Image (spheres, rainbow, N blue to C red):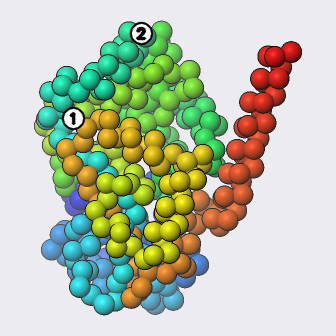
Amino acid sequence: MTYGWNTTAYQILNPGFEYWFAPNTPAVVAYMRRRNIFVVAGAPVCPAEALVGVIGEFERFASGAGCRVCYVCAADRLRETVQGSSGYSTIVIGAQPVWNPQEWPELAVARRAIRSQVARARNKGLTVERIADRSGQAESELQRILDEWLNARALPPLHFLVEPQIARAEHPDRMTMVARREEKAVAFLVASPVAARNGYLIEQVARSPWAPNGSSELLIDAAMRHLADEGRDFATLGLVALSTRAAGIKTNPWWLRLMMMIARAHANRFYNFRGLERFRMKMAPKHWETIFAIANEPRFSMRTLYAIGEAFAGIPPWQAIGLGVARAIGQESERLRRRLATAN
């Protein structure tokens, strides 16, 4: 809460990480070891002036364990720190939209796409409340919505910096908002502090299949207005992988650009790259920040990319893809069965 500047700073409290603490500096690095690579969540959490020294100490620790390092979802501050060094390679993985909550009330009125969806949700009887206590009934409601939301996804749940089980976490600095219809919870939002930037990352928006249109927009609108009332001036909905708004994506290695092009064209059944980007653009962000993966190797390798995929999937990427395909086949088979049953 003192030095968390990178958007991912508070996310390192999510399950699954190992931690390295600097011996003589208030600094922590959260990472997952995948084969011989330490996949780091964002960047070291430390004073800005200590970043160079902390990176050096941590990478010596990793080298002692026989590992290289890759900082995933790093932002400009880390990229500028290592820029020009022949020992590092950087790829662009996407971009995150950024708003100033102080400007949100005026924006929400001016933008028809926001205004109409919020009004639609309210007309359906939705109300939003912030909940401070996530125990008991509240935890049960959030878990039910999360389970319904995850069951509708094509891919198995991801982890690392998209861990779905954060609603259970007992971290009081997080902000949780719940949308209800006729007193029944149908959607929720969880936001994590980015303390050193006086703002929040809206980390998760989950909705039941029964939630009316506009539920997500209503939750985001309520969260932005709350942040504005608190005097915050930074908010983001987090990384949009492969975003066309990312500056410098054409500088990626040719093989990675090809993979990204194929993913955007054909993988939306599993991860809705285009839909996520369109939704965030509809919310009219003030600007987009490019997000990077930075490895301490002269050329970014396929092996490092594989380690990143394994960190997110929790299993080898090829296995995750296979499970996703099997799950998608099962979902389509069930839809076909229901159509045939209705037709008969």
In the rendered view, tell whether residue 229 sits above or below residue 292: above
Of marks 2 and 1, which one's residue comes earlier in the chain? 2
The three-letter code of the residue at mark 2 reads Gly
The three-letter code of the residue at mark 1 reads Leu
Q: Could you tell me residue 214's position as x and y percent?
A: 40, 23
Q: Could you tell me residue 140's position as x and y percent?
A: 55, 28
> Is residue 269 or residue 185 the one in the foreground?
269
Note whether residue 48 is visible: yes
Quadrant including the C terminus = top right
> Element type at marker 2?
loop
> Residue shown at 19%/44% (left/top)?
286
> Residue shown at 44%/30% (left/top)?
188
Q: Quadrant of residue 296?
A: bottom left
* Residue under pointer 1: 227
* Residue under pointer 2: 125
Q: Quadrant of residue 320?
A: bottom right
For this view, does 81 lie left or right of residue 119?
A: left
Q: Could you tell me residue 76's position as x and y percent?
A: 24, 66
On residue 323, the disc is: none
